[in-house]
Image (spheres, rainbow, N blue to C red):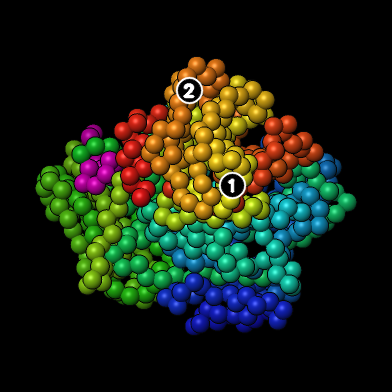
Amino acid sequence: MKTNRSFSLGIALISAASPVWAAPPSSDYELLFADEFDSNALNAAHWRYREDVRKGGYFNGLNLKENVSVSGGQLRIVARHEKIKGKPEYTGGGIISKYQFGYGYYECLSRPFMAGKGVHTSFWQRGGSVPNNNIFEIDSYEIDSTQYLSTNNLYLLLARKGYRESPWPHRGHVPFKFQQDGSFLDAYEYTPDGIVFYDNGKVVAKAEWEDLTAAQCVWLTALNGCGKVDEGKLPGESTFDYFRYYAKDYPGVNLLPNGSFEYNQDKIDPSEPICWVVEGDNLAVKVVEGNSAHDRHHLRLGRQGKAYSTTLRQKLEFIRNGDCTLTAMVRRSRGSQSASLRVTGCGGPDASVEIPAGETWTKICLPKISVTNHTAMISIQASGEAMQWLEFDDVRFMKPALPDQKVREPKPFVVCGDPIWSLARKEPITFTGDDKFYFFDRNVGYGDAITVSFIMNPAKLAATSPIERIPAKGNAGWAVQLRADGDLVFRIGSGENHTDVVAKAAYVAGSETRVTCVFDKGTASIYANGKLFQKQSGIPQTTKDDTKAGRLGAVGDTFEAIGDVTVAAENQKPRKAAKSVKYVGTVRDVRIHNRALRSSEVAVLSSESY
């Protein structure tokens, strides 16, 4: 049953046969954007078509405008096997919003194609309607046809030199079912603390990442030619009933992406600050490192050899109305140059503040900006003579903090720190013995020395493996395993070639245990709740393998990570040594280091846990 749009309540019954209501997780949310796809054509003001080629690796398909239509109250994306210019091709398609959305609750009702293999349907967020705006990717779901496993991802797209790839902050895979009417109600809540994923109204995963501030586009796609294709099942169709976006207030929290100019790191052209549109003299723009007001980087405007005039701007869309403040840390050389911070297009009066001269960092403020149309344009304008300069840092646009609140001070921005990967720091993940698991990247737990540490509470004594990054063959890899007699095993090497270091009676069922396993150049140590249970040297195998992604939860070979997708293994034979069952219980505070923790650090880590 298709329902009418309701901007005032944002609540609608999905189907007469379904008990699930489409509603945001709290009454604080306001519906600010909805496309119910209830016309006879795609709304060109809202969306553009995805038209590109994706080939190589797991994909072999084209995305065409002709495969997308709107009818019967649905967005329809057809997957075909057809001839294009005389050549057989797998074709699909999709749409990308022309708007950018920030913190909020995102919801979509859809019916992914599932009749045959080869179609990859997704509801996700990435990139911008303006260039140079790739910050992260949130996959509310990725579903490969015939596979009832919903993939909930957070990928960080920013990186530093010297890393082959940034670790995946969150790559969760959760079994799901369609509702009684065959639809899938999927949603995610993007907050200043991270991402909460919902399947059919139920929280299924959480990605913790504080202050990852962005405003990016929404994508609804159905790619064809993903792995082996059941050509006899094509053409097939993925349909989308609606997309809705809700926002709420976060007093004291910055809504402006990259206001501290940290996102470029050392790999993006410093004359093109991520998220900001540069107009005028782009040679006068540079993100510089050191001597900043906040964190490591700041923006510098000016040229040594000639006069300059330039403007940087960002447009925030679909923000809550009300009074906002704009602040920044600034400094500039003395002279007659013009320099200001401005807010325009917000529905209320435009506002600006001139930048005072002075070579020490000074805070400026526009204290009361009236937003009445859910939009604000923030601009930095500067012009001057040769050798004159202006610097900006820590630009914040926010609702004022409430009387009993503090302004949220952002932590230093770290792309890849120590530990190199962490998960479930705030609350545990529950595993019930189904196919739920989390991938982690190949550069996690990689090297001559590593540390794997987590708090587990197994529901029962069992032969199982809560976490591993171990290939079937070779000389390198690692796994943390449990035995049904209460022993802990730290396996070094591959499935066929390994050394098992065993800690006797190191865990009990129904009780939390901080497990810490350290490997350091041939020596392995196992700690439980800070106590050293076993240490063994002379291990010929290593942990320096980058062929296999790691898994937490339901480990094994059923699925493999291929780039940014999850592939179901074809005709996979079980490992000879794999007689374990899927882990049942909870895991929390997972920390993996690409170095060996000292015994004193292990003791501190264990004391922090209790």
- 289 to the left or right of 211: left
Identify the magenta region: 292-305
In terms of secondary structure, where does tag 1 sit?
A: loop
Q: Position of residue 325 (x, y in %)?
A: 26, 66
Locate the N terminus by quadrant.
bottom right
At 41% from the left and 55% from the top, the residue drawn is 426
At 62% from the left and 68% from the top, the residue drawn is 200
When the figure is inspected, residue 437 is found, relative to residue 497, above or below; the finding is below
- 454 to the left or right of 338: right
> For the residue marked with disc 2, what is the amino acid?
Gln
Q: Position of residue 183 (x, y in %)?
A: 70, 68
> For the residue marked with disc 1, what is the amino acid?
Leu
In terms of secondary structure, where does tag 2 sit?
A: strand
Return the mark for residue 536.
2
In the picture of the structure, the residue carrying the numbered disc 1 is: 461
**How packed is label 1: few (under 14 Cα within 10 Å), some, or many (20 or more)?**
some
- The residue at the far right in this view is 232
Q: Camera-side residue: 194 or 176? A: 176
Q: Camera-side residue: 184 or 357? A: 184
Quadrant assignment, res 205 = bottom right
At 29% from the left and 64% from the top, the residue drawn is 252
Residue 517 visible, this angle:
yes
Return the disc, 2 or 1, that comes first in the chain's sequence.
Answer: 1
